[in-house]
Amino acid sequence: MNAIKALIRVPVAADGSCFGPDLARNGHFTVGAKGEEKKYDSFEAALDALTKMDKPRWRRPNSAGNWGIVSGNAWKSIERG
């Protein structure tokens, strides 16, 4: 029997990276503009906060492994974990 996976909408940055459950750092997800960042213990809480922002922003590592803020410019649906 095939299980139906739920879809969730996540923000996507200009470089194609998207906000996902793998972006916890030290057990927290950091979202918001620089100087207004907030940390959330769960992916769901952080995603909820992102959906309420005019422009979603979150921290994620770049190709060198440095954590920086990116801004979402689109949304896409992904399968929930």
Image (cartoon, rainbow, N blue to C red):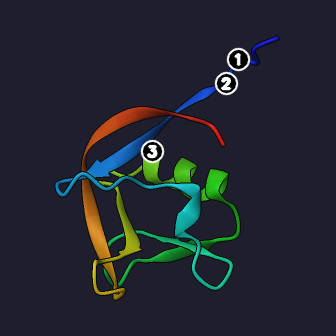
Binning the other alpha carbons within 10 Å of mark 3 as few (below 14), some (14 to 19) or many (20 upward) gives some
Q: CA distance from mark 1 to mark 3?
A: 24 Å
Mark 2 residue element: loop
Does dot 1 land on a helix, a strand or a loop? loop
Q: Residue 6 vs residue 50: left or right?
A: right
Residue situated in front as seen by the camera: 69 or 23: 23
Q: Position of residue 18 (x, y in %)?
A: 37, 52
The answer to whether the residue labelled 3 contacts the one labelled 2, judged by CB atoms less than 8 Å apart, is no
Q: Identify the residue under disc 1.
A: 4
Calculate the distance from the C-alpha at mark 3 to the C-alpha at mark 2.
21 Å
Instruction: Looking at the picture, tell me which residue is in the foreground, 61 or 48.
Output: 61
Question: Looking at numbered disc 2 in the image, what kind of residue is underneath it?
Answer: Lys
Residue with the mark numbered 2: 5
60 to the left or right of 8: left
Closest to the camera, between mark 1 and mark 3, is 1
Residue for point 30% across, 48% down: 12
Q: Residue at x 34, y 88 (%)?
A: 66
